[in-house]
């Protein structure tokens, strides 16, 4: 159950990539229901200088933030791939997206790929197709999302679930402690448990 003082919020999910960065914006109402607002793909020119490709990601994420006014940004945490060069480029694309959020003063939340898959498919080993199908079903979408847009929506869904769980814990600890809150160490342990 959602705190009565909370109003509708929007979450910007981002699936960063140097070639294609997907984004999805979801709205969470006061009852905790999620609805799909919009999504898109930011495509960069493979022949453009790398710095220009990063700038395009940064600029277009800023445009999305400025037009949709999200309350939070969610991304998948980095994982070490087999191709080190690709992993480094992915990290730089993530950095451009995270910097755009920071420039606008938005909190950024990161979730492991397993946590994201668990949130939407109930199974940490779900493949891309299963994630796409479950995101469409979860958000009652009639249109199909691209792989990158679906991944962005999935991480936004994961954040909504995690944030709701954290609010419930905060509310419970306030009741138990007579108005107190969890100490920082307990809050960190709780967040890590919610992201597993």
Image (cartoon, rainbow, N blue to C red):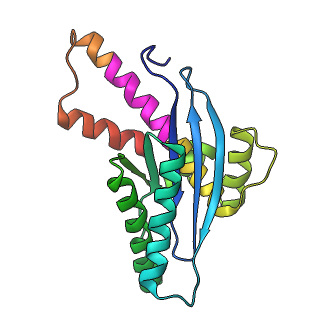
Residue at (18, 35) in percent of width and height? 184
Q: Is the stretch drawn in magenta largely helix, strand or loop?
A: helix
Q: Quadrant of residue 80?
A: bottom left
Q: Quadrant of residue 120?
A: top right
**Residue in the foreground of this view, choosing between 132 and 92:** 92
Residue at 45% of width from left, 85% of height from top? 50
Q: Which quadrant of the structure image shows residue 157?
A: top right
Estimate the x, y position of residue 61 in percent, counting from the top left. 49, 59
Q: Is residue 95 visible?
A: yes
The residue lying at 39 percent from left, 74 percent from top is 92
Is residue 29 depicted above or below 149 in this figure? above
Residue 169 on the magenta span:
yes
Q: Is residue 115 visible?
A: no
Query: Is 120 displayed left or right of 102 in the figure?
Result: right
Q: Position of residue 111 (x, y in %)?
A: 43, 51
Q: Against 76, is 175 above or below? A: above
Position of residue 104 in the picture relative to residue 135 (left or right)? left
**Foreground of the two, 181 or 65:** 65
* Residue at point 59%, 51% (across, down): 24
**Magenta segment range?**
159-171
**Above or below: residue 51 compared with residue 170:** below
- Image location of residue 34, percent across then percent down: 61, 33
Residue closer to the observer: 101 or 170: 101
Does the magenta portion include 95?
Answer: no
Q: Is residue 68 left or right of residue 129?
A: left
Q: Along the horizontal axis of the image, is 186 left or right of 139?
A: left
**In the rendered picture of this protein, how many numbered marks are placed on residues?**
0
């Amino acid at each position: 159950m959602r705190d009565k003082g909370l109003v509708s919020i929007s979450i910007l999910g981002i699936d960063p990539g140097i070639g294609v960065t997907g984004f999805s914006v979801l709205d969470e109402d006061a009852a905790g229901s999620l609805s799909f607002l919009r999504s898109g793909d930011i495509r960069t020119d493979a022949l453009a200088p790398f710095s220009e490709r990063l700038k395009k990601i940064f600029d277009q994420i800023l445009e999305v933030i400025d037009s949709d006014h999200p309350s939070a940004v969610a991304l998948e945490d980095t994982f070490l791939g087999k191709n080190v060069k690709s992993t480094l480029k992915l990290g730089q694309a993530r950095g451009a997206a995270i910097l755009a959020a920071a420039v606008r003063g938005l909190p950024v939340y990161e979730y492991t790929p397993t946590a994201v898959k668990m949130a939407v498919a109930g199974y940490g080993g779900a493949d891309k197709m299963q994630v796409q199908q479950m995101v469409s079903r979860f958000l009652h979408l009639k249109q199909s999302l691209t792989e990158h847009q679906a991944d962005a929506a999935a991480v936004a869904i994961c954040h909504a679930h995690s944030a709701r769980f954290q609010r419930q814990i905060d509310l419970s600890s306030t009741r138990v402690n007579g108005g107190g809150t969890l100490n920082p160490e307990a809050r960190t342990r709780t967040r890590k448990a919610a992201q597993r």
